[in-house]
Image (cartoon, rainbow, N blue to C red):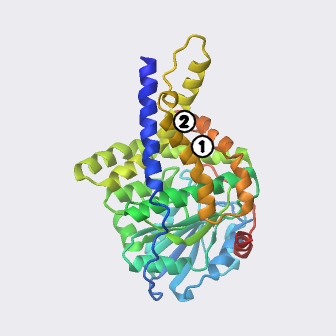
Amino acid sequence: MLDTILLVLQIVLVLFGAYQLFLTFFGWKRPKKKTQHPPQKSFAVLVAAHNEEEVVGALLENLKQLDYPKELYDVFVICDNCTDSTADIVRSHGLYACERNNPNLRGKGYAIEWMLKELWKRPRQYDAVVMFDADNLVGHDYLRHMNDDLCSGSQVIQAYLDTKNPNDSWVTASYAISYYFANRFWQVPRTNLGLANYLGGTGMCFESNLLKQIGWGATSLVEDLEFSMRCVKLGIKPTMNYYAKVYDEKPLTFRASVKQRLRWMQGHFDVCRRYLFPLLWQGLKERSWTKIDAAFYSANVYNYFFGSILSVAIWIKAIVPGGTDMNLYELAPIVNVLAISIYVMLPISLFIEKASGKTYKYLIAYPIFMLSWWPITVYAFFTQNNKQWSHTKHTRVIRLEEVQSKQVS
């Protein structure tokens, strides 16, 4: 019976892997650029910040220099339960410091929900809302791309997510490798196939009328994934703009990365539990590949969970004397080809996305980073009811020019 269960689980996981490999073939071609429109959309630029005095200044300087008419956008920094000088720094830049103090409802999702309510009360209204984290940097043409997409009919848009410190440590490099792969072989295929893209937590743009109509309502530990699933369930397709760049700071240490990824996986289990079967059922009834694909994406957390348990079980059975081992990777050699193919896509994604030459050497350590997802995911499964938000401290002060110069070199 145990052998049969293990074999069935392996088949399910292989099918998920085969589906992902199938999608990658549609990521080789870059998406077409949207038709360019003259600047006409107005933007409320929201920056989520909790005790970010060390890094927020660089982003504010960056945002004030965007290549977009200054009268068409305003910057609002959500100083969420801050106990440092974040708000003072924002005011020194002549921008809006919106201070929120609610220790009972902590987290980015709650902060955004509060800020949107405050925003709708203001005399000036905006065509769209964009959201960044305080540690980000933004390409100068970001708002121009969002303007083009909105004019072309998009209502929810995700920018290309890159890292601003990819080579600070093997941990940040591992994040960068994951981002290159996800952008090219997860996001781009969905763009080219007309499926829904998924939001990445920052660099997001939303049509104001849509937000007013459906509300924010995403207050889980992964508000980006939650809002993505809500949109797809309502028949709204988030899109990705491949050419709008946002650079995110990643944790330097393995310990900090574990803390961050644990929060992500706890939230992912929560969202999957609420959206997997409703989306899958809707997709089957409506014959909607978009909704079925979104359901599969939400289920990726269980792909990691069962994959980790299954791998350990197979290893244990392999070393137990006299134990039988129904290992699909031995029964069907083509499965090994599938696993190798997915890993080979990593250096290919680095090459296509023109990653720095330094990043390639970290491919050696990348399997360690990936294996570390196993215990994180298993622990997250048993603590998925934890809704306590944890803050990732950011200290790396980098300017956009420095990031772009390193990419060129």
Read off the residue under disc 1.
262
Mark 1 neighbour density, 10 Å: few (under 14) some (14–19) many (20 or more) = many
Residue 371 % position (x, y): 63, 39
- Does residue 88 appear in the picture of this structure? no
- The disc placed on residue 74 is none
Query: What residue type is disc 1 on?
Result: Leu
Please tell me which residue lies in front, 353 or 244: 353
Q: Quadrant of residue 54?
A: bottom right
Q: Residue at x 51, y 52 (%)?
A: 222
| Residue designated by label 2 | 383
Q: Quadrant of the N terminus?
A: top left
Specify few, some or many for label 2: CA neighbours under 10 Å numbering under 14, 14-19, or 20 or more: some
Answer whether labels 1 and 2 touch (C-beta < 8 Å).
yes
In this orientation, which residue lies closer to the viewer: 90 or 323? 323
Residue 80, given in percent of the width and then of the height, sits at: 60, 61
On the image, which quarter does residue 399 sit in? bottom right
Position of residue 402 in the picture relative to residue 31 (left or right):
right
Q: Position of residue 251 (x, y in %)?
A: 70, 53
Q: CA distance from mark 1 to mark 2?
A: 9 Å
Q: Secondary structure at mark 2?
A: loop
Give the image quarter of residue 141.
bottom right
Disc 2 residue type?
A: Thr
